[in-house]
Amino acid sequence: MESPLSVNLEKVSHIFNNAVYLLLIVFFLLGNFVSFYFHFLTVTAFMLVLINVYYLYIQKQHALLSNFGLLAQIRYMVESIGPEFRQYLFMSDTEEKPFNRIERSEIYRKAKNVDSSAAFGSQLSFGPNEIKLRHSMYPVHKEDLKPFSVRFGEERNISNLHIIKKPIMISAMSYGALGSKTVRALARGARKAGITMNTGEGGYPKYHLMENCDLVFQMGTAKFGVRKENAVLDEEKLSELAAKDQIKMIEIKMSQGAKPGKGGLLPKEKITKEISELRGVPMGQDVVSPPFHTECTSAAETVKFIRRVQEIAGLPVGIKMCLGRPDEFSELVHQMKTQDNYPDYIVIDGAEGGTGAAPKPFMDDVGVPLYAALPIVQKILTEEGVRDKLKLLSSGKLINAGRQFVAMSLGADSIYTARGFMLAIGCIQALQCNTNTCPVGITTQDKKLQHGLDIEEKSDRVVNYINNLWHDHEEMLASLGKKSHSQLDRNNLYIPAQF
């Protein structure tokens, strides 16, 4: 039975399309016999007729347009603004993905140095799958907390140690994925806050270096910035880059959580002449990195490559990876023991990690989530007796202190976050990072869209975000009855049995 509210779209479109032709005739006659000014409407009606004729009889790409003409275009217009309507008018505070409004609001308030406390009760789920932190009956005084410190490279007793004083670092985001103003705002904020920033795999870190903060140079599978042809390492370029004062560590990116087993992707829309030169790639086509390092075809070769980079750079060298098969990771650790050579740190990136662009099947269906991966990695390293040979870092949606504490309780010595800092400088989760149309100018090379991003003001937001995160860390550490982050372990967590 037909609903009383149903519409016969065929009849409506027939009336609508005929009305457009009729209006053209009416305005033409009125312009000739009543007033010349009606011809302004004649021109408008004529343009509508031309568009309608094109939709109905010329274009063949969209069946809706061929069948219903201009009326069908309204459907596409409504569809295009649907996400904005849902985000601001229809979705609840806990519905949006990957970060809901509550999570984003907390970061915004921290970055603006506004009170981020809440009232009445949590709006989040307390279901059977929730991991929670266990507080202590006997909290410690904040005055008794020990300063945070992680020393990268100490296990190898190298002279160029890198020491961090806060457990939070800016995760890998390259120039290309981000605009130049964004990179400078984050780097300036990192310098002011005294934290370390990862350059991402985008090649020579021109804008990262401008702000004189401590940097981790990330070497992706394409080795932008330190490559020869066919993505082979150029030792001379790596040595020159590692000699710069701002470069404190080198990170070999094996894979990332959003697209494990798939190389990096920079859409052609975001490649400017400058990016083309810095990366050594042609313009006008997508830049797709290889899925693996040409030097790393086995566990044994991977460990040899790590040693080679350590010897060239003379700095702490780590690897970043998303966990796939535990047996392959075990074999990698076995080779480290056999060759008696270890990276100075390993970053475990969860499958829920973010990216500037990735194939949807990889983003949705490949890789192990962080909270499942970390315990596996921690167990393998501990059982093999090598946990004290390296540092363990983590990344993947770690935007607030609660999630960061869970990761550190599962084994991480410190954490990376990328999207936390993007939100801090104004990201509205428009999900347009891959289209060069970011409305707030963060992930675009369009100078007009970058216009509203003030480097100094946004760098202050980075500082506020870090300071307020650190305040939460101190408060939570005291509530757990711990005096230092190094005392965090799995016993601090309530983990459901099915986890």
Image (cartoon, grey):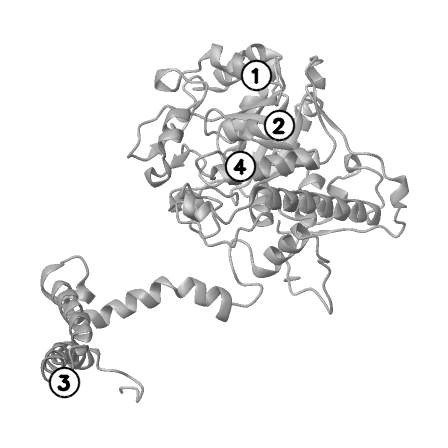
Which of discs 1 and 3 lies nearer the camera? The answer is 3
The amino acid pointed to by label 3 is Val
Mark seen at residue 242:
1
The amino acid pointed to by label 4 is Val
Residue 146: x percent and y percent?
85, 35
**Residue at x-position 42% and y-position 50%:** 432
**What residue would you read off at disc 3?**
34
**Residue at x-position 9% and y-position 64%:** 57
The amino acid pointed to by label 1 is Ala
Which of discs 3 and 4 lies nearer the camera? The answer is 3
Report the Cα–Cα distance between label 3 and label 2.
71 Å
Q: Are dots 1 and 3 in contact, CB under 8 Å?
A: no
Mark 1 element type: helix
The amino acid pointed to by label 2 is Asn
Residue 119: x percent and y percent?
73, 67
The single residue placed furthest to the bottom in the displayed view is 4
Instruction: Say if residue 83 shows up in the picture.
Output: yes
Report the Cα–Cα distance between label 3 and label 4.
61 Å
Mark 3 element type: loop
Residue 69 to residue 474: above or below: below
Mark 2 element type: loop
Mark seen at residue 183:
4
Residue 364: x percent and y percent?
44, 48
**What residue would you read off at disc 2?**
212
Report the Cα–Cα distance between label 2 and label 4.
12 Å
**Quarter where residue 16 is shown:** bottom left
**Residue at x-position 68% and y-position 52%:** 110
Horizontal arrangement in the rendering, residue 334 relative to residue 267 (left or right): right
Q: Earlier in the sequence, mark 3 or mark 2?
A: 3
